[in-house]
Amino acid sequence: RRNTPPHRIICMTRVLFVCLGNICRSPLAEAVFRHQVRERGVEDRFEIDSAGTSNYHIGDPPDRRSTATAKQHGITVAGSARQIRIEDLRTFDYIIVMDAQNLADVERLKAAGGGTAKVHRLREWDPQTGSRDVPDPYYGGADGFEEVQAIVERSSAAFLEHLIAGAADGV
Ligand code: 4NP
């Protein structure tokens, strides 16, 4: 074989971000994580998606307040809302939820349908102390979206470093 570059086997990590509606927090987390993965040059190692625990906004685009805030931070939020499915607990390696209610809902789905996904709250990796919930900004003002942006950026970055460090250890 000529002109074939040496290749390594790449272990794909599949990550699903989950909130209640899949229009505010989880599409933002998906976009931020995608952005950080690209910046770290590891986009060929990840499959990334987001979903909601509820059926409230199926098919809807991301909330304009989420997209506007993210844009100011150089990040494009896209996609349309979908509801989490039982098979997501089998096909994804990590389900990263935003708050304690999402965690309870996803754990219940995992117990009902089986599955091997690791389920964690995003703020388990937040380097700052405080609440482990990403607050729901839906009924609040623009400052809530700015707060969510900052929380998601720093927590997602730390989560990605955790995954990259784990991959280097051959985990
Ligand atoms: P998300 O925000 O869970 O971050 O997408 C919400 C979106 C919609 C609703 C609640 C939270 N809702 O009640 O319709």
Image (tube, grey):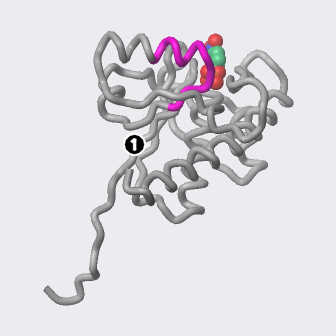
- Stretch of the chain drawn in magenta: 96-106
Q: On the image, which quarter does residue 153 sit in?
A: top right
Q: Is residue 104 magenta?
A: yes
Q: Give the vertical position of 153 relative to 130 (above or below).
A: below
Image location (x, y in percent) of residue 160: 56, 49
Q: Is residue 21 above or below residue 69?
A: above
Ligand 1 picture quarter: top right
Residue 30 versus residue 163 in the image, above or below: above
Place residue 127 in its image quadrant: top right
104, 128: nearer the viewer:
128
Quadrant in the picture for the N terminus: bottom left
Q: Residue at the spot x=68%, y=25% of the render?
A: 132
Furthest toward the front, the residue is 169
Image spot of residue 89 (x, y percent): 35, 26
Q: Give the amino acid at mark 1.
A: Arg
What residue lies at 55% left-to-right and 26% top-to-bottom? 97
Identity of the residue drawn at 32% across and 60% down: 10
**Residue 22 picture location, percent across and down:** 55, 26
Which residue does the numbered mark 1 point to in the structure image?
14
Residue 129 in the image: x percent, y percent? 78, 32
Which secondary structure lies at badge 1? strand
| Residue at left offset 58%, top offset 31% | 26
Nearest the viewer among 48 and 154 is 154
**Between 60 and 26, the one nearer to me in the picture:** 26
